[in-house]
Image (spheres, rainbow, N blue to C red):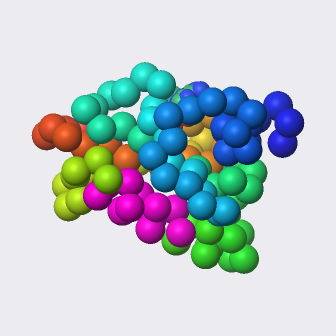
Amino acid sequence: MADCIFCQIGSGKIPAEVVFQDETVMVFKDIHPKAPVHVLIIPKKHISSAADVTKEELPIFAHMLEAANIAAKKEDIPSAYKLVINTGASAGQVVMHLHMHLLGGKKITSIV
Ligand code: AMP
Ligand code: ZN
């Protein structure tokens, strides 16, 4: 999607601090970090939100978790992190391209 910021990051048109990528996913640093480690995991294919993931796209979703674990190791938090997927505007999703937040590096408390 031409006007989607995360599609443009995924294709390299907009720069980002990339932690890991392959042909399916990209992991890059959040521009406004909420924790010492705060990276975003995106599929390179445009999927609007977790609610829009089809059965056929489930392998992409699984691959995002694999990429999160690779990034967690690279960022030195291999076994202590929080994954967050805001889904829908009323749940806090601002960028309408599926992304997982990987947060860690300090004790993180929240509603869950
Ligand atoms: P969400 O509220 O779940 O949609 O989260 C969107 C996240 O994207 C926020 O944490 C923003 O700080 C982050 N973000 C927006 N634009 C960029 C960008 N160009 N590079 C890195 N992170 C971004
Ligand atoms: Zn997109």
Residue 36, quarter of picture: top left
Outermost top residue: 32
At 43% across and 22% down in the image, what residue appears?
32
- Please indicate whether residue 108 sits to the left or right of residue 40 in the image: left
At 29% across and 58% down in the image, what residue appears?
73
- Relative to the observer, which residue lies in front, 54 or 31? 31
Give the total number of marks visible in the rendering.
Answer: 0
- Please indicate whether residue 20 sits to the left or right of residue 22 in the image: left
At 69% across and 30% down in the image, what residue appears?
14
Report x, y in % for residue 96.
67, 39
Residue bounds of the magenta highlight: 63-73
Residue 103, quarter of picture: top left
- Relative to the observer, which residue lies in front, 75 or 84? 75
At 72% across and 77% down in the image, what residue appears?
56
Q: Is residue 17 magenta?
A: no
Outermost right residue: 2
Secondary structure mostly seen in the magenta stretch:
helix
- Relative to the observer, which residue lies in front, 89 or 31? 31
| Vertical placement of residue 42 versus 59, above or below | above
Report x, y in % for residue 27.
50, 48
| Vertical placement of residue 29 versus 102, above or below | above
- Relative to the observer, which residue lies in front, 110 or 77? 77
Instruction: Quarter of the image for the N terminus: give it.
Output: top right
- Please indicate whether residue 98 sits to the left or right of residue 85 in the image: right
Look at the image and tell me whether residue 94 can be seen.
Answer: no
Report x, y in % for residue 3.
82, 31
